[in-house]
Amino acid sequence: MKLITYRYQGQTQVGVVAGCETYAVPVSALGLSYADMNELIENITPQELAALRKASARSCDDCGSSEGVQLDQVELLAPIPVPKQEVICVGVNYMEHAYESAKYKKEEFHGDRPFPVYFCKRCNLATPDGGYIDGHFDIQERLDYESELAVIIGRDAVNVSQEDAWDYVFGYTIINDVTSRDLQQRHKQFYFGKSLDTFTCMGPWIVLKDDLPVPPAQHIWCKVNGEVRQESNTDRMIFDIPYLISELSGGMCLKAGTIISTGTPSGVGMGFDPPRWLRSGDVVECGVDGIGVLTNIVK
């Protein structure tokens, strides 16, 4: 089941994709009054989720004769346009990317990753599928892409064990963790170079946890102008999803709606020799099997 946030006739709505993935059905048509995706994640009941799943299975004819709107007639927004808190990101969580990152920084790397690297990504407004990435070329030059599987927490998580971690997962989406490598290096930390406006691309929707294997072992990839740059599998993370949820919740409450972006595989622009930075007009596609494709254009 795919949950979406979209704009239609001037109104922003939360809905479900139905009718062979050709229709958007608003949750309000099913008697649910959630104003946005954050409110839905925090408050939806198992019975309401079952009703949404039933709606997602509607045929095209059923959708056309109800409150459904053809998907190509709506403006798709990021599934969580304004996250309640900053996005939690995991740095260098694939071994091949750890190697290429160290090489770019001219640092020695011996394959030892005893602890995760955590950082936050400020997001005033997430960039949706089809949206533009502002390259901010007036203040930076080395624009990079990072295709990532993002986990969305479904209920407040405190001191969660790895064994129980999956009970706290609501679903998944795709994030392109757009990054300015020169700002990242200049300031000796990740925050500024990853938090410029439009640098959090998210979408195209949320896929519920039950719709992917547990744990998810999904093909993850990125293309730039049709050329494959990144290609791996999410089962190659150094620190898996239960580990991340357990460790983070051991020291702070992960509120419902928290987004954890789980890291990117090798093949980012800085990993090439010479580096291959994004330029104005480039089309970036980030994909995760079972979820979909997030496409954005650099302007």
Image (tube, rainbow, N blue to C red):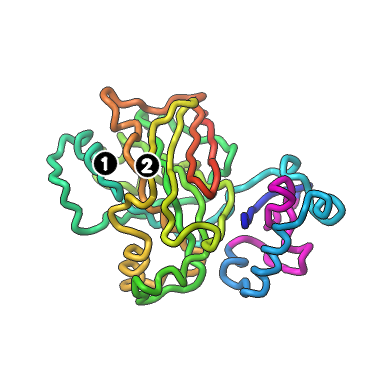
Q: Which badge, 2 or 1, is on the more N-terminal residue?
A: 1
Name the residue beneath numbered marker 2. 232
Residue lying at 51% horizontally and 52% vertically, measured from the top left: 173
Residue nearer the viewer, 238 or 181:
238
Q: Position of residue 255 (x, y in %)?
A: 46, 69
- The reply to whether dot 2 and dot 1 touch (C-beta < 8 Å) is yes
Local secondary structure at mark 2: strand
Marks 2, 1: nearer the viewer:
2
Judged left or right of residue 292, residue 160 is left
Would you call the spot at circle 2 few (<14 residues within 10 Å), some (14-19), or many (20 or more)? many
Residue lying at 68% horizontally and 56% vertically, measured from the top left: 16
Q: Identify the magenta region.
A: 11-37
Name the residue beneath numbered marker 1. 96
Judged left or right of residue 82, residue 68 is right
Local secondary structure at mark 1: helix
Q: CA distance from mark 2 to mark 1?
A: 10 Å
Residue lying at 12% horizontally and 40% vertically, measured from the top left: 108
What residue type is disc 2 on? Answer: Ser
What residue type is disc 1 on? Answer: Glu
Which numbered dot is residue 220?
Answer: none
Residue nearer the viewer, 199 or 24:
24
Residue 87 on the magenta segment: no
Q: Position of residue 85 (x, y in %)?
A: 46, 61
